Image (cartoon, rainbow, N blue to C red):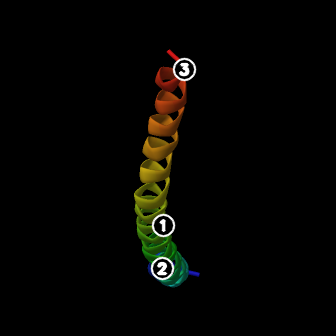
Amino acid sequence: MSDCEEVLAILKRMEQNQLKALQIQSEQLAQSKAQIEKTEARVQESIELQKTAVSRQAKALNVVVPILLLAMLYVAYLLFRHT
């Protein structure tokens, strides 16, 4: 084998290795994109759940706060009624 043929063989192996590396990078990129899409979907789901929780909390406070105020007023009435 002459020097030229050896260099050509080395260059072909380098090319094959680069093609394999590009293929692996392409697969990793596809996996990363899929993972990003899953993460974005989970984030959106989490945001929706948080909105629902905040809405329910606000509704609960709209019910509980007046009841607590009425209870406190009633207790105050009972305390001051006997004095």
Disc 2 target residue: 41
Q: CA distance from mark 3 to mark 2?
A: 61 Å
Residue 70 lies, with reference to residue 20, above or below; the image says above
Which residue is pictured at 43% across the width and 42% down the height?
69
**What label sits on residue 56 in the rendered view?**
1
Which residue is pictured at 46% across the width and 45% down the height?
70
Q: Nearer the viewer, mark 3 or mark 2?
A: 3
x and y percentages locating residue 78 in the rendered image: 54, 30
The kind of secondary structure element at disc 3 is loop
Is residue 14 shown to the viewer in this render? no
Query: Observer-nearest residue: 54 or 50?
Result: 54
As shown in the figure, which amino acid type bears the numbered disc 2? Ala
x and y percentages locating residue 24 in the rendered image: 55, 78
The kind of secondary structure element at disc 1 is helix
As shown in the figure, which amino acid type bears the numbered disc 1? Arg
**What label sits on residue 42 in the rendered view?**
none
Q: Are marks 3 and 2 in contact (CB under 8 Å)?
A: no
Near mark 2 (Cα within 10 A), the count class, few <14, some 14-19 or many ≥20, is: few
Instruction: Tell me which label, 1 or 2, sits earlier in the chain.
Output: 2
Residue 43 lies, with reference to residue 11, above or below; the image says above
Q: CA distance from mark 1 to mark 3?
A: 40 Å
Which residue is pictured at 49% across the width and 60% down the height?
60
Disc 3 target residue: 82
Near mark 1 (Cα within 10 A), the count class, few <14, some 14-19 or many ≥20, is: few
Instruction: Tell me which label, 1 or 3, sits earlier in the chain.
Output: 1
x and y percentages locating residue 42 in the rendered image: 52, 73
Q: Residue furthest top?
A: 83
Q: Nearer the viewer, mark 1 or mark 2?
A: 1
Q: CA distance from mark 1 to mark 2?
A: 23 Å
Residue 58 lies, with reference to residue 3, above or below; the image says above
